[in-house]
Every structure is written in structure tokens, then in C-alpha cells.
Image (cartoon, helix red, strand yellow):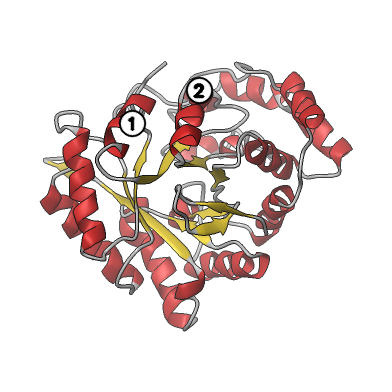
Amino acid sequence: MKTRLMGAAGPAVSCLGVGAMSFAEFYGPTTEENSQAILHAALDAGVTHIDTANVYGMGRSEKAIGAFLTDNPGVRDRLHIATKASITRRDGVRVFDNSPEHLEAELDKSLAAMGTDHVDLFYIHRRDPSRPIEEVAETMGALVKKGKTRAIGFSEIAPTSLRRAHAVHPVAAVQSEYSLSTRSPEMGLVQTCAELGVALVAFSPVGRSLLTDTPLSADVIPSLSFLKPNPRFSPDNHPRNIAAGAPFRALATEFGLPAAGLAIAWCLAKGDHVIPIPGTRSVAHFSELVAGANTVLSDVDVARIEQVLPIGWAHGDRYSEDQWIGPERYC
């Protein structure tokens, strides 16, 4: 497995990571045993970066990772583990808390859940716009000094916010949705990350299944709390997006790859600092993702892919209005 730097000073991690949101039944039922099987497959394939968060299944994802570490002594040093905090609820309302007290308390809970004394990367899951990001970067830097995290990151922030934070404390990574169906990071974030030596950790790189050979079917969508209100999976847009992806699936077959693998290969071709973190509940599907990570595309290949799925091909926004609360819009 090829490696890439997680931030200007490293460390080197696998070019493909595991997005552990799927360990919390985000896309359907799963078990801890199944999650552990995926982690075993990841290590066997040379995948070392595991990306989770405290709110995934209200700790379920982190507990699955912790159980894996407990059951497999010695593997902790082979893994680069990231988690996130700042999303919480007060009086039944979702809020974003970037205060030092909240972030450290949540990180301590995450460390306990995973049975480790540090994480390798700790992200602000959502920025609190009422608190200067410079102050938040200082807060995160203090956690580095305490040894509770090796590096800091932010999720879904604007390029300008990244510059402000990075001027206070080195930012190792910015996590953002980035795929053939979500190209907005190319309007400043991809470039700024490259300039500053910051890794762009791309979540949902297979378009929440739309860029696979077996997109989620219409009868499954109503049972998934995130996708049910998502505009790309509405009764009107979902069949249009399935149809629009058909030429891409055909092209993947021509390349001798699963569609998900070709989506990963495209993502990796968009910059040496891009690290996709697909989620999956299937070891078989994970092998498709690994096949993509082991594929190198030429400029001609990338152009062919972008011809069948040009910028703007997807029907519907990537988020509903409620889901847009938190991510910074910058273009």
C-alpha cells in the first residue's frame, strides 16, 4: 500500500483509510465482529489510518475500535487513529462546542473507549463560528502538548479558516467530503491544503454508494436517518443519479475495476496530499476499495472519467438545509 504524509511533518500513513462511521450502522445494520473483520482486512492490506468520531453511534464506533485493540495486542503501534469532537446536544438541540473544557473532556472519553493513551489526530468536528478559530487552534495545540493527541485537524472548514488556524498551530489534516459527485473542495480547499502541506482527508469518496456498482436501492433509503432527507437520495433525484452513474460503472468495467475502486483511484489522482477514507460494512467491498488504492491513473484516464462524470453531474445538493448547519460554505 502506498503511503502519504498526514501533514507537512508526517507521519506517513496508508494512502487509503477506513472511515469508521459505518461501524455505527450509519448505512445499515452491522456488528462489532463485522467491524473487526474489516479492521483485520485493513491491516492485511497495509491500511493504517482509521478515522472515527465520538458521535458515531454515540461512541459505538470508538468502542468497536477499542475492542479490536484489546483483542489484538500490539496492533496499536501499527495504526494511525483519528477521532473528532465538538458536536453535542443541549436541551435537545444540536450545538457545536469548541471550548477547551468540552474538547478535552470528550477526548478523554474517546481515549477511554478505545483503550489508548493518545490518538494520532484529533479534529474539530464542526467549528463554532462564535469562537475565533485562532483560539480553538491554541486549545487543540494544548492537547498536543499534553500528549493526548499527536496532531490536530478540522472538519468541513473553509480555506480561509484553515489559513488562520494553521498560522497559530500546524494543522495536519482537513476532513471534507470530496468525490466525483462532490467537487466543491476544488474551489480552494484542495489547493490551500497542498500549499500548506495539510492532508485533505476525503470522506464519502464513493458518493455514499452512488459511485459503486451497487448503489443503495430506493427501498433502503427511508430506513437511513441521514440519507432519507438528503437531496441526492430523494424520490425524484435518486433514480436520476443512478442513471447518471451508469456510464461511470461501464467505464470502470472497461478499466477492469469495480466502480468503487475507480472512484478511489480518481480521488488519489487529484493530489498527493489527498487521503480518501471510505466506509464499508463489507470485507468484500473493502477489497474493491483497496484495488482502487493500488491503481495509478494517467492524466488521460482522469480526463476520461471526468468526461463521463463532469463537475455538476449529480442531481440535488449534497446536504439538506439542516445538514448544512455546521459545515462552512466558501464557494
Q: How many C-alpha atoms fall within 10 Å of the one at disc 2: few (<14), some, or many (≥20)?
A: some
The spot of residue 24 in percent (x, y) is: 43, 55
Between residue 322 and residue 291, name the one nearer to us.
291
Q: Please tell me how crowded label 1 is: few (under 14), some (14-19), or many (20+) other residues with Cα within 10 Å.
A: some
Q: What residue sits 49% from the left and 20% below the top?
A: 187
Marker disc for residue 44: none
Three-letter code, disc 1: Arg
Q: Residue at x 38, y 27 (%)?
A: 159
Query: Residue at label 2?
Result: 184
Q: Secondary structure at mark 1?
A: helix
> Which residue: 41% across, 55% down?
52
* Quadrant position of the N terminus in the picture: bottom right
**In the displayed structure, would residue 42 be above or below residue 156?**
below
In the structure shown, which secondary structural element does the residue marked by tag 2 occupy? helix
Which residue is under mark 1?
163
Q: Position of residue 207 (x, y in %)?
A: 58, 35
Residue at image point 31% right, 67% down = 118
